[in-house]
Image (tube, rainbow, N blue to C red):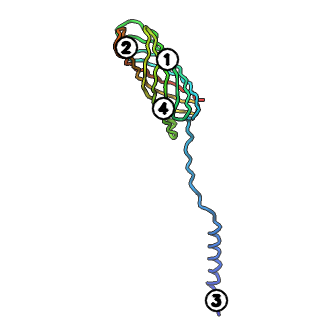
């Protein structure tokens, strides 16, 4: 029996290809990494901001300091104090107004954008020419530059049983409290 030279050369080549492919290893798997969320659970925040207060009878500008604690990425409690020089539209001079507010926060972090829109619900008190308790509802957004430093902007609608901006009683409070500032998270 005579062997053909081509079979003699091809047989080892096929054996080599089969053995090489069996030892080639696994294919590379694509690994997708999700960006690290800069909004954390068990996070303390301290913020400072410029504040404006606007109602039907006047407006004012001032400053705000606040502190908040988020026990999860989504839920937190906060307390802040705004001091505003409020001027009525039809008068000369401004009065100092202090607004102390407590908040329940509901936020939704978007990790890929380092952004967290949030809602606020709470209440507090305002002091000035007269004093009274108020409730509020509002929302805002925070952008984190780093896990510990961010910028925020929010606005609350304050409501109550008598108009703080007017000396007449029996009306309804309706004013906004807007804040723009920096937030530090720990």
Given the current orientation, which residue lies at the most extreme bottom position? 1
Residue 29 image position (x, y, % from top left): 58, 56
**Which of the marked residues, 1 or 3, is nearer the chain's N terminus?**
3
Label 3 Cα crowd, 10 Å radius (few <14 / some 14-19 / many 20+): few
Q: Measure how far apart labels 4 and 1 are at the Cα level.
A: 20 Å
- Numbered tag placed on residue 163 in the rendering: 2
Residue under pointer 4: 106
Q: Residues within 10 Å of mark 1 (few under 14, many from 20)?
A: some
Q: From the image, tell me which residue sits under label 3.
A: 3
Q: CA distance from mark 1 to mark 3?
A: 100 Å
> CB of mark 1 within 8 Å of CB of mark 3?
no
Side of 100 relative to 87 (left or right): right
Counting residues from the start of the chain, the first of labels 2 and 1 encountered is 1
Q: Residues within 10 Å of mark 4 (few under 14, many from 20)?
A: some
Q: Is residue 132 above or below residue 181?
A: above
Tell me the distance, in whole angstroms, between the alpha carbons under discs 4 and 2.
28 Å
Q: Which residue is mark 1?
A: 100
């Amino acid at each position: 029996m005579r062997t053909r030279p081509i079979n003699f050369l091809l047989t080892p080549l096929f054996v080599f290809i089969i053995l090489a492919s069996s030892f080639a290893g696994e294919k590379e798997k694509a690994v997708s990494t999700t960006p690290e969320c800069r909004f954390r659970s068990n996070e303390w925040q301290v913020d400072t901001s410029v504040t404006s207060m606007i109602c039907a009878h006047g407006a004012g500008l001032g400053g705000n300091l606040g502190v908040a604690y988020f026990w999860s990425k989504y839920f937190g409690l906060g307390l802040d104090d705004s001091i505003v020089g409020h001027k009525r539209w039809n008068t000369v001079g401004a009065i100092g107004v202090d607004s102390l507010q407590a908040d329940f926060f509901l936020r939704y972090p978007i990790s890929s954008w380092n952004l967290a829109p949030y809602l606020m619900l709470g209440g507090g008190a305002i002091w000035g020419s007269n004093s009274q308790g108020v409730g509020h509802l509002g929302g805002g957004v925070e952008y984190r530059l780093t896990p510990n430093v961010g910028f925020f902007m929010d606005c609350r609608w304050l409501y109550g049983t008598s108009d703080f901006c007017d000396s007449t009683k029996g009306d309804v409070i309706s004013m906004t409290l807007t804040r723009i500032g920096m937030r530090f998270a720990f």
